Image (spheres, grey):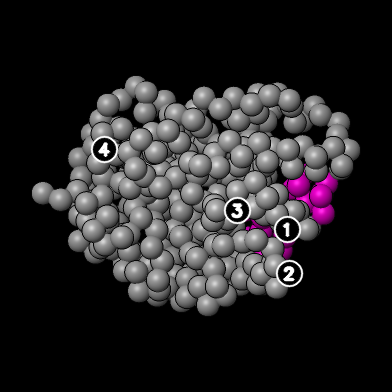
Amino acid sequence: ESTLRDVADEREFTIGTAIDPDSLRRDPSYWKTASSEFNAVTPENALKMGPLRPSRHTYDFRDADAVVNFGRENDMTVRGHTLVWHNQKPEWFQAWDYTDEQLRQFLREHIHTVVGRYRETVDAWDVVNEAVADDGSMRRTVWSDALGEDYLEEAFTWAREVNPDADLYYNDYGADEINEKSDAIYDLLEGLLERDVPIDGVGLQLHALGDHPDPDSIAENIERFRDLGLEVQITEMDVAFHADDVPADALEIQADYYREVVEACLEAGCDTIVTWDVHDANSWLRSFKDFGERYSGDPLLFDDRYERKPAYYAVRDAL
Ligand code: XIL
């Protein structure tokens, strides 16, 4: 029987998964499933600034290397996630009394070092993650405060300087369908392109938690970004339900939704979907904040014991 990866390879489709390095080391079923069923990886946390920067002048690349090397050894595409984000910054940041220029130099050095280290091994970077607030305004963060609103332009330029071959992405959540936020991101990216900022694509996270964005609207949204000349990837997909409103046939509804998204993606000319980890037991919904109480916690293609779920077959059949 063909694996999901076999079918995706055949169709030249990229089907990826987020990867957690501890599971990789500890659990043979984890890496076996990841490498036989997916042809792409994204380190789920290991390339974020917090995990990478134990102190202001040092790096700890062990976890990031483990995931990136796993991907390369298994001929998988590697997405680097993420260089500039307001979350998961290092703890010591809080106590650092920096000047704006110091922070700018710090970020520049960070991007140069990290992108440079993985020049041969990371195919695409989420250069900036979640810069737009839910109402469509620019999110105020340490980066926008210190570098000014033009920080996106600088970040993309610094990444391109070190790796002209990697595809450079803007990545965000809640912008999967046509709405206020995706409108704002559209305007933002259109502006960057007009100013010749080196950006290649937009990542739609597609955390369908409770509310499931309309697949037709997703297709339309993908098309408009592609018309701007950008690639579009679905970068962090998972499908859950509100905990107090889980339908009896949740697994079937989940499978239908995954299938509709694959179809929307194909129809609109997107060639990549990444799920946010391999199996339900590793989903961030189980451990993040109060998400365990808010959402059903079985959002992925494989269940806790690595059994293929209806959603798995739905994706495989749709490809
Ligand atoms: C999540 C991880 O899955 C968790 O393990 C971590 O505790 C918090 O971050 N948007 C993103 C991802 O871009 O990096 C987030 O990942 C989920 C939301």
Q: Residue at x 50, y 65 (%)?
A: 231
Q: Position of residue 284 (x, y in %)?
A: 44, 39
Query: Residue 24 is drawn in which quadrant?
Result: top left
Between circles 3 and 4, the one closer to the viewer is: 3
Q: Residues within 10 Å of mark 4 (few under 14, many from 20)?
A: some
Residue under numbered circle 4:
33
Marks 1 and 4 in Cβ contact (< 8 Å): no
Marks 2 and 1 in Cβ contact (< 8 Å): yes
Q: Residue at x 52, y 36 (%)?
A: 45
Q: Residues within 10 Å of mark 1 (few under 14, many from 20)?
A: some
Task: Kindly state the secondary structure of the residue where label 1 is placed.
Answer: helix
Q: Position of residue 107 (x, y in %)?
A: 74, 41
Between the residue at mark 3 and the residue at mark 1, the CA separation in whole angstroms equals: 15 Å
Between 137 and 209, the residue placed more toward the observer is 137
Q: Is residue 235 visible?
A: yes
Residue under numbered circle 1:
153
Task: Kindly state the secondary structure of the residue where label 3 is placed.
Answer: loop
Between circles 3 and 2, the one closer to the viewer is: 3
Query: Residue 89 is drawn in which quadrant?
Result: top right
Between circles 3 and 1, the one closer to the viewer is: 3
Instruction: In the rendered view, tell whether residue 225 sits above or below residue 52.
Output: below
**First in sequence: mark 3 vs mark 1:** 1
Based on the picture, tell me whether residue 80 belongs to the magenta stretch. no
Q: Which residues are magenta?
A: 130-148
Residue type of the residue flagged with mark 3 = Pro
Residue under numbered circle 3:
164
Residue type of the residue flagged with mark 1 = Glu
Mark 3 vs ligand 1: CB under 8 Å?
Answer: no
Q: Residues within 10 Å of mark 3 (few under 14, many from 20)?
A: few
Residue type of the residue flagged with mark 2 = Arg
Residue under numbered circle 2:
195
